[in-house]
Image (cartoon, helix red, strand yellow):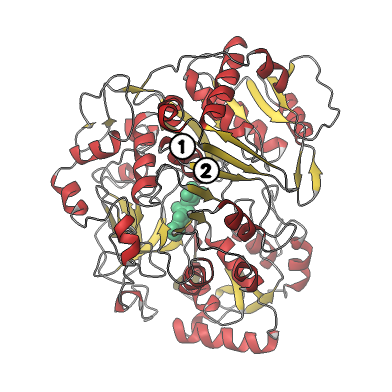
Amino acid sequence: MTMGDGTGRDTAIDDRPAIDPPAWFVEQANVSDPSVYDAFEAEWPECWDRAGELLDWDDPYDAVFRGDERPPFEWFPGGRLNASYNCIDRHLPERKNQLALIWEGPLGDATTYTYRELYREVNAVAAALRDHGVEADDVVTIYLPMVPELPILMLACVRLGVVHNVVFAGFSADALAERMERTGSELLVTCDGYYRRGSAVAQKNKADNARIAVDQDVSVVVVERLGLDVHLGDGYYDYEALRATHDGAEVDPVPRAADDTLFRIYTSGTTGEPKAVDHTTGGYLAHVAWTAQSVLDIKPGDTYWCSADIGWITGHSYIVYGPLSLGTTTVLYNGTPDHPEKDRLWELVERYAVDVFYTAPTAVRAFMKWGEEHPAGHDLSSLRLLGTVGEPIDERAWRWYREHIGGGECPVVDTWWQTETGAILVSTLPGVDGMKPGAAGKPLPGIETGVVDPAGEGVSEGEAGELVVTRPWPGMPDALRTGEDWGAAAARGEEWRYYPEDGATIDDDGYITVLGRVDDAINVAGRRFSTMELESAITGVTGIAEAAVVGADHETTGTALYAYVSAEDGYTEADLRERIAEAVTDAIGGVAKPEAVVFTPDLPKTRSGKVMRRLLAAVANDDPLGDISALRNPEIVGELQSATPDS
Ligand code: WTA
């Protein structure tokens, strides 16, 4: 079986037998009956009742789905519900004294909230917001790091039917202003500052600058985290004072129609401008709850930790809404994995006896680079399931994760989804499906996807194509649901389809391997290479921790491949260089051999952990760097520039 791009490379993944989940896992799994796939198929769309049933509705829905071949689509029409009620109130009879949130700070400080305490906080803050004049459908912007006030405010907003717009705390003032201006949001909640890697970040200064930059009048509520003596001028309010005034208040959760907006989140679109994605109250929450249950196998009473930041969709869906709607204990960590030491996460897994851990492949590769002694020093036996999200995970990192974090026993779910999909669409059900390291898995029950060529026809097994979602799903965003955004499908004049703009292959078992964004493809000498394909060849070399490949202008080939790599300790560059060339030649062909291999201690990454390839391409081409405010490690840029040879 070969790739369809003429490289003649074996895809290999489909030749390998799947790794079955261990019997002890299957026995306790939320979903363990393989007939779930057929059952969903036979009863689509009514099958999604199974997700709707996980929630409490004020008014029951008239139907699970209403719609035809094309938009508009409606999920759970007629139903009314409140997300705050579903995440808090309904758990009180059984688990008021169970922890809802565990917050762990950067300096070893920690706070916990039981469901009862969370109820009290959320009600007080909701009362304060209501008093401030905020009403259903208003948009409140929240610009906070990973502190307990962040989920508390989100839940307070949705209690009132107010739409929250969380802006990642690491974004610049300009990025914040742009997102506020686009939503017309008139209330901003931020904090005085917070600690990051041991130093204080002056968050309020950034908020002040954004406030000045936008056209609308903005009130600002300031959460005091650092005890900085910040000045609260006109239009500024102290969070604690507002909360204390309303302590003990109770606010009735406002019932919302299933397709009313729950929140807005901005993501990067193809135009490079931030794109607003609105998620619905009913469809989104049902989809998130169902996937948290079936894929992440979360049970009420579990201690569950997703190490993402709430500022991104992963945190919205699988730190806040998924786990809390299921009545679990969700861990919030405001800190970095290597501060104060490289075993920080494992210390926390041990201390809190975490059952399920969900992180990004980039983090796994960092753990791998730091060495297995860090997890080995801790008792990680509480872990039952591991997950990854956000980018493809190569087989080596997958195996390392399972071996050194999962004790060689835990199933690993590689979950594919996006800001736009709201919740997981492609993965394995850990209590049902075999796992193929490197492949995400199949479309989940009730989800239909395909891998197609540019003409929209399905590709043959092992051939690279574009991933498409060919049926509506409950967590779909408003613009897709209403048809406002017909997207690429309409442009191509086809039936309704959603193009996530990811390249993929599919094997004969229907397992999908995501190759990366289609816009990450590089053409060299008339051949197209997936950066992912190149990178997985390079990271397959023992001693290479991470790699990113970009195209640089080249006299003869038009484009040359530049590989930026970081090595594990104890390997020599000369040796690795040679083996990288061999590995690429072996896997893809001599034509794909990188023109330059640049060693760097770390790759440039956004705060959500994505490698900023655009920056590497700019460095390789000696172009202006553009906006690098989203960069987590800007100090690396100078090093990259001096290490990069002239093209
Ligand atoms: C990529 C994050 C491979 C993909 C939830 C997608 C993945 C983009 C995976 C969305 C995975 C996400 N395997 N690639 N398991 N999960 N991606 O919007 O390119 O921040 O389109 O959502 O991440 O990123 P976003």
Q: Position of residue 162 (x, y in %)?
A: 50, 21
Which quarter shows the C terminus?
bottom right
Count neighbours of disc 2 (C-alpha within 10 A) and say few if under 14, some if 14 to 19, many if 20 or more. many
Front position in the image: 406 or 254: 406
Q: Amino acid at mark 2?
A: Thr
Front position in the image: 488 or 535: 535
Q: Can you tell which mark lies on residue 324?
A: 1
Q: Amino acid at mark 1?
A: Leu
- Left or right of 452? Residue 371 is right
Q: Can you tell which mark lies on residue 278?
A: none
When asked about the image quadrant of residue 172, the answer is top right
When asked about the image quadrant of residue 456, the answer is bottom left
Q: Quick check: 623 above or below 129?
A: below
Q: Quick check: 210 above or below 7?
A: above
Which quarter shows the N terminus?
bottom left
Q: Position of residue 145 (x, y in %)?
A: 66, 39
Residue topped by disc 2: 330
- Left or right of 585? Residue 544 is right
Residue that sits furthest to the left in the current view:
42
Secondary-structure class at tag 1: helix
**Disc 1 within 8 angstroms of ligand 1 (CB):** no
Residue found 19% across the figure and 34% down from its top: 68
